[in-house]
Image (cartoon, helix red, strand yellow):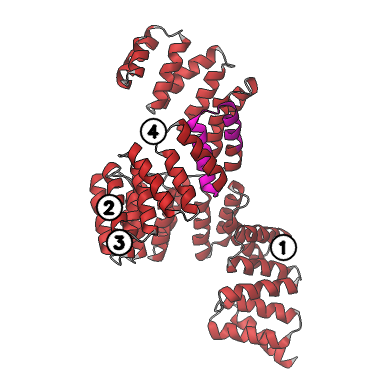
Amino acid sequence: MLGDYYLVAGQPDKAFTEFASLCQEHPDDLNTKRIYIGMLVGRNQVAEAGKLNDEILKKNPQDVGGLIERGLIFIRQSRANDAIAPLRAALKIEPDNGTGHYYLGLAYNQLSQPDIAEGEWRKAAQLRPNSAEVQQGLAEVALRRGNISQLEESAEALIKLTPSSPLGYMYRAAVKASRKDLPGTEADLKLAVQVAPKNPLVYTQMGELLVAERRLKDAEQAFEEALRYGPDSDEALRGLARVYVIQKDPAKAIARINQQITKAPNSSDLYLLLGELLAGHSDLEKAEAALQKSTDLDRKNINAFVLLTQVQTARGSQDRAIATCQRNIQENPRDVHSYVQLGVLEETRGNWQRAQDLYQKAMQAEPDQPVAANDLAYLMLTHGGNFDLALSLAQTARRGLPDAPGVADTLAWAYYNKGVYDTAIDLLKEALQKNPNDAAYHYHLGMAYREKKDRANATEQLERVLKLDPNFPKADEIRQALASLTKG
């Protein structure tokens, strides 16, 4: 009763101490143990929570609460794949357990599978219609997918369920912003500020609105308020930097980021932002140092690894770029971008077999990865391989990147090698509209026209290649082709 009193009285530290003592004195009291496990998870002491929860499941492997808690513990440890099995097991025993469906949705959301997550959260909403956390999950999915009607529904539900929380007003503001209702957006954000005057997210969203209205001084003030209450908020600092860039003062933006880093020196995201800005203004040496610091502070910051590799490549430091990619693969083995980046670097060095292996690994992790599919297809077409598989890969790339000229070129070359010249020509014309000075595209188009016995167009395209790039790798072959076209 004393522990419960402390919880109700808003004294969580005293409640925690009380339940820790009770749990130690009465290890067989499952009720007390469950409450204490929940407190440990809330404090992110998941390792200790896991040990106690395992004790419950050891006595009863079918304990639904224990299975659900195990799933949550895995989610907190960023082990969403491991969370699915215990949560599924719990729901097999109790299909109508709303909490189980909610956590299963969290796991799938963490695995970047929003469709399945939304389905689980919809089930949870039916079972727990008054759950604010379920509505928040639905709102986040809706916001990410641009589902404005669902976002509006969840926003209204949150305002009704938790009128003293800013989230409902913020989501509703996003709905109004999508409808260009700027006065309505500002009114809802002001309501969010009233209920949560120290929440940095509210001020950040207000700053974004003010930037859209070109009220830059007010936007600057809003972002500064966000940083006052959240000194490690990279979103707020990113918005503030954008204000200075719009005002054509990037030096001020860089200085402001450095100032904020002194307040949050262990923020990987702030160093990432600094690196982005420095790279954007061609100070690659300092950008590399900032991004290196970002990856040192957070080995899971994939965006920092990716940009660091790009900066090192731009500086001509291929060895360092390769080392960074390899480090990213070691730290983040499920990140397909690192395999693709390393593949591109190996291909540049002439190690196309190694590049092919890396693209295949990326495709194994993410079968629809368009860049890996495109580059793998092109290697197979260039160095010999299964042309049917290359065509299939090129089609996968095209679905993922329908507007990329390089992808159109790869697909065209696959059709060329299959003897489907008309389709190849159409795709190459499309690629050249977007990138008219690419010698490779002209070469491929010239060869397709040659196979069609269209001498005039073939000659025009192949001569264009030599004008654009006299040292084109296929220059000798092109001269021979032009000679045969002239004789013919």
Q: Residues within 10 Å of mark 1 (few under 14, many from 20)?
A: some
Q: Residues within 10 Å of mark 3 (few under 14, many from 20)?
A: some
The residue where tag 2 is placed is: 221
Question: Mark 3 — residue?
Answer: 244
Magenta: main secondary structure? helix
Mark 2 or 4, closer to the camera = 4
Distance of mark 2 from mark 4, alpha carbons? 24 Å
**Mark 3 falls on what kind of element?**
helix
Q: Which residue is mark 4?
A: 164
Quarter of the image for residue 3 reads: top left
Q: Position of residue 472 (x, y in %)?
A: 56, 79
- Work out whether residue 192 can be spotted: yes
Q: Residue at x 47, y 31 (%)?
A: 161
Residue 91 falls within the magenta-colored stretch: no
Circle nearer the N terminus (2, 1): 2
Q: Secondary structure at mark 2?
A: helix
Mark 4 or mark 3: name the one nearer the start of the chain.
Answer: 4
Q: Are marks 3 and 1 in contact (CB under 8 Å)?
A: no
Q: x, y (%) of residue 356?
A: 59, 57
Q: Horizontal placement of 428 versus 186: left or right?
A: right
Q: Secondary structure at mark 4?
A: loop
Q: Is residue 122 magenta?
A: yes
- Kind of residue at badge 3: Tyr
Residue range in magenta is 119-147
Mark whose residue sits in front, 4 or 3:
4
Tell how many labels.
4
Point out the image quarter for the N terminus. Answer: top left
Q: For the residues marked 4 and 3, what is the alpha-carbon distance in whole angstroms?
A: 34 Å
Q: Secondary structure at mark 1?
A: helix
